[in-house]
Image (cartoon, rainbow, N blue to C red):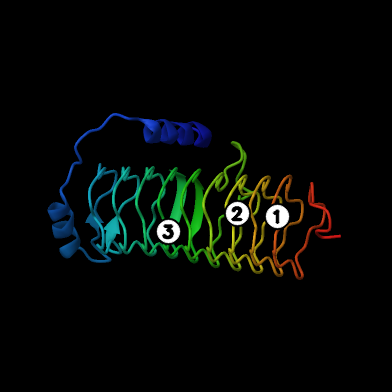
Amino acid sequence: MTIPSLFATLLTLAASTTTFAAEMTRAQVEQALATASKHRPANLKRKDLTDLDLSGLDFRNADLWGADLRRTNLSRANLSGLNLDLTVMTNIKLVGANLSNTSIFGVSMMHADASGADFSGSRVIAVMEGANFSGANLSNADWAADMKNQSMGLMRANLKGANLTGANLSNSKLGRAMLRHAKLNHANLQNADLFSAEMDGANLTGANLAGANLSSAKLHDAIFNNTNIQGTRFDDAQHLPPGIGR
């Protein structure tokens, strides 16, 4: 199966309204985690964990690759360093969760609530339309499209309409990311790399863009009220508002 067709399959699964019972209960997940170790991780690979309340659990010794996590509550859970590639995370709840240094590739996180979550150092290529990352920590995250691996079509971070109000994106990589109509009010984008990002209609009111790279970014109708653009690069940026980057 090609990458785009696999991605399309995941999105179709994510959009499904059919509800089935999860394969495990919270108690069974807790038991699996209790006996797990780095060398013998809890096998949750491809498990259906939809709709479970797994908040506050430590998954660092678990294999969640390809798991179905639709509507699962993982608030305050520790998922640091995990490979969450090809999971299904639509409408997942990750409030205050630790996802630092995680890998999330080929995933739907549409309408996820990850407010206050820690994604620092993470590598994410996913569909995150309408997701809530308000107050989240995305510092040093690499969510940029890898142009050396695009033979099957552009795979990138899609944050269209996402809420990143007050988020920390300092030193993050968001090259070619989709950020149309994203809320970046009062976000910290200091030294962030937004090369060729699509930011039409994005709200950057009160944001800190000091030292950021917006070269070749698309900025039609982007809002820059009280935005710190000291040292910001706008080389070849499209549709710059009057007085910005001149």
The answer for how far apart the CA atoms under marks 3 and 2 are is 21 Å
Q: Which mark is residue 115?
A: 3
Write down the quadrant of residue 78 in the picture.
bottom left
At 77% across and 62% down in the image, what residue appears? 233
What secondary structure is found at the residue carrying circle 1? loop
Q: Does residue 186 appear left or right of residue 46 in this picture?
A: right
What secondary structure is found at the residue carrying circle 2? loop
Visible in this render: residue 102?
A: yes
Q: Assess whether mark 2 and mark 1 are in contact (beta carbons under 8 angstroms).
A: yes
Q: Residue furthest right?
A: 246
Q: Nearer the viewer, residue 242 or 179?
A: 242
At 76% across and 51% down in the image, what residue appears? 216
Q: Nearer the viewer, residue 211 or 43?
A: 211
**Residue under label 2:** 144
Q: Position of residue 1 (x, y in %)?
A: 46, 32
Q: Which mark is residue 77?
A: none
The answer for how far apart the CA atoms under marks 1 and 3 are is 25 Å
**Residue under label 1:** 195
Q: Does residue 211 appear left or right of residue 132 in this picture?
A: right
Write down the quadrant of residue 245 in the picture.
bottom right
Q: Is residue 217 above or below residue 120?
A: above
At 44% across and 52% down in the image, what residue appears? 104
Residue type at mark 1?
Answer: Phe
At 61% across and 51% down in the image, what residue appears? 146
Callout 1: 10 Å neighbours few (<14), some, many (20+)?
many
The answer for how far apart the CA atoms under marks 1 and 2 are is 9 Å
Callout 3: 10 Å neighbours few (<14), some, many (20+)?
many
